[in-house]
Image: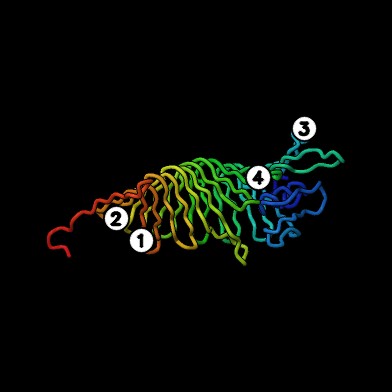
Amino acid sequence: MRERRANRLTAAILGAAAACLLSLAGAATPAGAQTGTTDPLSKGQAGAPVEIEATQGIEWRRNDKTYVARGDATAVRGDLKVRADMLTARYRDKAGGGNEIYQIEADGGVVLTQPGRTIYGAHAVYNLDSRTLTLTGGNLKVVTAKETVTARDQLEYRELERIVVAQGEVMVESGTRRIGADMMTGHFDRLADGSLNLTRIEAEGNITVKTKDTFARSEKGDYDLGQDIMTLIGDVRITNGQNQFNGERAEVNVATGVSTLHGNGDGKVKSLIMPAAAGTP
C-alpha cells in the first residue's frame, strides 16, 4: 500500500469516485461494479478505466464510510485528470442494499484538467446529488483557451446548467480586456472537440470594464462574448482618455471601443469632454 504502483486501481469504489469528480458527472457504482456515467458531456469516456496513484497509500475508513487516497494523489481517466494532496470519497448505504458515493472531496493544491480547461483551488467538493463542483481557498482560477477567470472566495461549477459562479473580487481576462465584479456567472457552450467555450458573463456589484483605451464602471453588467458587446446598467461611468460620460445604461462594443450611452427616466446623459491641448489636432 506504500508503493506508488501498488496503489493503482486498488479500490474500485474510490476509482468510481474519482471518475465522477473528473467528469463532473454520473452516479457512483457499488464496490467491484463497472465504473460508469450517463453524463452526455463526458465525451464517451464512461467505460474508460480509472488509474489512481498516491504516494502515501489508499485507506478505507469503515466507521466513517470514506475512502481516502493520500500524498500527491492523482486520478486519471482518458484525458481527464484531478490532482490533490488528498482525495476523499464519502459513501452511504442504499435502502435496497449495497452503497453509493454521494460526495467527493479534494484537498490541497487541487488541479482539475480536461481539454480546453484547467481549474485550480485549495479545496474542492463535488456533490453527486446536485452535480455541483465547489472550489474554495487560494489561487481560485479557471483557464480556458480564450479566457482566465479568477476569484477570491469561491468558484462553483453547476454541471446541469453548464455555468460557473465566481464570488469575491472576480476578474475575467481575455487578451487586453479585463472585466471585474463582486460576483460573476459565466455561461458555457460545449464545442465539437469537447472543450468548453465561454459565451456570456453576467456580473453584479462594482463592475469594471477595461479595454485598450476605455474604462467603464457600473452596478450590473451583461457581456455577450459572441457579439463582443458589454451592457452596463446602473450609475454608468465611462472614461475615454480625459473624456467622461455618465448615464443609466450603456452598450460597449469591446472590439471597436464604441460606446452607446442611455439616460435615466428623463432620457438625459451627461458628458465632460476635455478640449485638446494647443497644437493637438
Q: Amino acid at mark 2?
A: Asn
- Name the front one of labels 2 and 4: 2
The earlier-in-sequence mark between 3 and 4 is 3
Q: Secondary structure at mark 2?
A: strand
Q: Amino acid at mark 3?
A: Asn
CA gap, disc 1 to disc 2?
9 Å
Is mark 1 in CB contact (under 8 Å) with mark 2? Answer: yes
Q: Residues within 10 Å of mark 4 (few under 14, many from 20)?
A: many
Secondary element under disc 3, as helix, strand or loop, is loop
- Disc 1 versus disc 3: distance between alpha carbons? 61 Å
Q: Is residue 66 visible in this depiction of the protein?
A: yes
What is the CA distance from the residue labelled 3 to the residue labelled 4?
Answer: 22 Å
Position in image of residue 29 (x %, y %): 79, 48
Say which quarter of the image contains residue 192: bottom right
Q: Amino acid at mark 1?
A: Gly
| Left or right position of 154 against 41 | left
Mark 1 and mark 4 lie on one chain; the one further toward the N terminus is 4
Whether pointer 1 and pointer 4 mark residues with C-beta atoms closer than 8 Å, the reply is no
Q: Nearer the viewer, residue 165 or 229?
A: 229
The residue under label 4 is: 126
Callout 4: SS: strand
Mark nearest the camera among 2 and 3 is: 2
Q: Residues within 10 Å of mark 2 (few under 14, many from 20)?
A: some
Mark number, residue 63: 3
Residue carrying label 1: 257
**Quick one: label 1 or label 2, which is nearer the N terminus?**
2
Q: Are marks 1 and 3 in contact (CB under 8 Å)?
A: no
- Residue 256 image-quadrant placement: bottom left
